[in-house]
Image (spheres, rainbow, N blue to C red):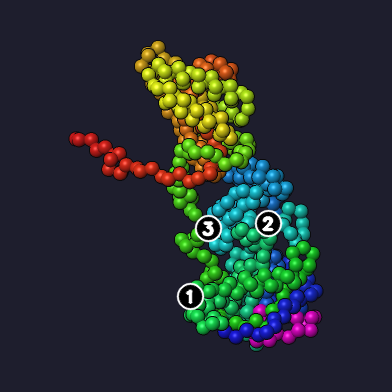
Amino acid sequence: MNFKDDIKIIGLKKIPLIKKGDSISEIIINALDINGISLENGDIIVIAQTIISKSNGRIRNLNEIIPSERALELSKSISLKVKSQGLPVKDPKLIQAILDESKEIIKSEHVLITETNHGFICANAGIDKSNIEGEGMVTLLPENPDDDAEEIRRKLKSKTNKDIAVIISDSFGRAFRVGALGTAIGVSGIDPILDLRGKKDLFGYELQTTIIGQADSLAAAAQLVMGESDGGIPIVLIRGYTFEYNEKTTIKTILRNKEIDLFRESVDDVIIKILKNRRSYKLPFALKNVDRRMIEECIEIARWAPSAHNGQFWRYIILERGKLRESLIDKMNEKLIYDLQKNGKSKEFIKKKVEKTRNIFLETPILILLCLDTLDLEKYPNNERTQNEFLLGIQSISCSAIYLLLTFEMKKLAACWYCAPLFAKKIIKESLKLPESYIPMAFFTVGYPLKTIKAPDRKELKDIIFEPCI
């Protein structure tokens, strides 16, 4: 592959405002004439997506959109994250437009990362509010940018008899880096990738894996001339880049197959990974504070656990470091010493046990107490049914506890479930002045891990599925 020593990037000036139905190929011909430029074989025309969308009528008025329940929920869930980043809150109507243009929501943080109906992974499904006149108006990505590029290329060839390439570009953000970059979303006349596998490097070694995203590189180069704000240059001519002319190309060849995308996991994969990775963490935590708001976000998820009669009997008490927690743990340890002495344990055993317990509960960044609130349990005259109702309550708060632990795993927090409160219910209720209906059930130590816990052995599936004899 031979490359020229210099490449020219020429912005075509005096492009008029584009309206629905305008012929982009005619506008390019006129612009070339105004700018005193004639097309040559091997030229590349890069066109900003916005004017393609405008000419195709791919414009939507947000004021005419009625947001769905999902759009409203997404708006609510990301609003705090958006504010924390100093960004404007997304209108539910805009979120609905994003949903309409997307196959899948990949991430919903302070920005919505989606897979568009074309298969592009980008922010907000490529919907753009800039460079379009009218309150509430937005441009949508062209429905088929390849077809648009092909039509423009063919019309330009019929007018000039030159073999050129056309790239339609947009600005996409990038994983792991700040800042948007010109990206090809449609091509004609040029392969989007340049496969150099099998070629030789400077030292004669055969290239094994080198594939260059040449269409993206050209789109990024053109963006330097186009600008992103009031530049007003939506069409750029690139001259001097050597490429193999090809009339049968598609942008789809540059899209990474989902199955080999290392940075994108399916929802099923993510859930399985969380379920299998969670461990009971009993080691020292990192010296890093845990934001209480993050804990509350985790409890927010935990409250969606299933419960008997939808009673939602769980009650959480967040104990941050301080005198209250220290006093509570000291009183619990006094009872622990008494119980162990009563069981005939040695002084050495008791000392180690008490010190370990005290250190665990005092040094954890966050200590959470889970209680069962018996107030909403059904009342029966029959003792057996009353006891079973109590067990239903325990099952219910256990489900919430599991949701909580899995949410901690999602947030990269380590945690462990301890049953110590079961043995000191009265002390805990008195120390924390809990309502009479509350029954302390469990502690959760929470913090950032220092080490990775090795997975314990699991019984074989055949050992835990019982087949009844018939």
Q: Is residue 255 above or below residue 416?
A: below
Q: Which residue is mark 3?
A: 263
Quadrant location of residue 181? Answer: bottom right
Q: Is residue 108 above or below residue 373?
A: below
Decide if residue 428 is in sight here: no
Specify the segment rendered in magenta.
32-44
Query: Is any atom of residue 296 visible in this view?
Result: yes
Return the disc, 2 or 3, that comes first in the chain's sequence: 2
**Which amino acid is tagged 2?**
Arg
Which of discs 1 and 3 lies nearer the camera? The answer is 1
Q: Give the structural element (helix, strand or loop) at label 3.
A: loop
Query: Where does the C terminus fall, quadrant-wise?
Result: top left
Residue 370 image offset from top left, x and y in percent:
51, 27
Q: Earlier in the sequence, mark 2 or mark 1?
A: 2
Disc 2/disc 1 C-alpha distance (Å): 46 Å
Which mark, residue 60?
2
Give the amino acid at mark 3: Phe
Mark 1 touches mark 3? (CB < 8 Å): no
> Residues at badges 2 and 1 in contact (C-beta under 8 Å)?
no
81 to 137, vertically: above or below: above
- Give the amino acid at mark 1: Gln
CA neighbours of label 1 inside 10 A, class few (<14), some (14 to 19), many (20+): few
Which residue sits at x=49%, y=54%? 265
Q: Nearer the viewer, residue 362 or 379?
A: 362
Q: What is the crowding at mark 3: few (fewer than 14 residues within 10 Å), some, or many (at least 20)?
A: few
Q: Tell which tag, 2 or 1, sits nearer the viewer.
A: 1
